Image (spheres, grey):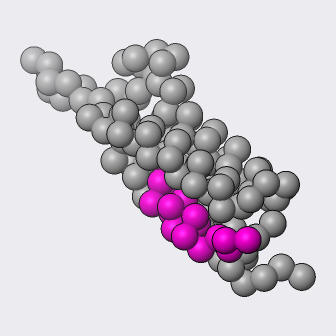
Amino acid sequence: MEHEPVRSARRWVLWSVALSVLASLLLLVVPVFASETPGGTSVEHAMDVIGPRALLVLVPSGIALLTLLAFQIGGTSRRAVALTGAILLGACCLLTLPSVGLLFLPSAVCMLVAFGRSPVTGR
């Protein structure tokens, strides 16, 4: 049977994954670029404007998913896994802050809470 702190930390990691996947999908699916033309305002998808580079918004989701996988396996300290995930997601947020970083900030915060909720000794 699993202890409550581990279950709580796992829930926070799951929330982090869900929020990062949601942010990535929104950036890929919802038209996010607008430009003013003589005929009116043109709204376009990220893939149409910047091409395959738009797939880079999937990187934070990949980090969160890998963190969840490592957290589920539990071979290493779950606390260290959650901290590593929080640091990597936080770095992604800071590096992309001028453009899309704010959308991934809730995911990084959830991962940081998962670190705080993880048991110190816990495997």
**Residue at 40% in and 28% down:** 45
The residues colored magenta run 107-121
**Residue at 18% in and 29% down:** 41
**Residue at 54% in and 70% down:** 116
Q: Is residue 110 in the magenta section?
A: yes
Main SS, magenta residues = helix
Q: Tell me residue 62's x, y (percent).
A: 63, 39
Residue 85 visible at all: yes
Q: Residue furthest front?
A: 121
User: As drawn, is 38 to the left or to the right of 97?
Assistant: left
Q: Residue furthest right?
A: 1
Q: Quadrant of the C terminus?
A: bottom right
Count of residue discs: 0
Residue 25 visible at all: no
User: As drawn, is 102 to the left or to the right of 15?
Assistant: left
Q: Is residue 54 above or below residue 65?
A: above
Q: Is residue 40 above or below residue 91?
A: above
Q: Is residue 115 in the magenta section?
A: yes
Q: Tell me residue 117's x, y (percent).
A: 59, 74
Q: Tell me residue 61's x, y (percent).
A: 58, 43
Q: Residue furthest left?
A: 38
Q: Quadrant for residue 100, please give it.
A: top left
User: As drawn, is 87 to the left or to the right of 30?
Assistant: right
Q: Quadrant for residue 101, please give it.
A: top left
**Residue at 49% in and 33% down:** 57
Q: Quadrant of the N terminus?
A: bottom right
User: As drawn, is 82 to the left or to the right of 24?
Assistant: right
Q: Is residue 96 above or below residue 4?
A: above
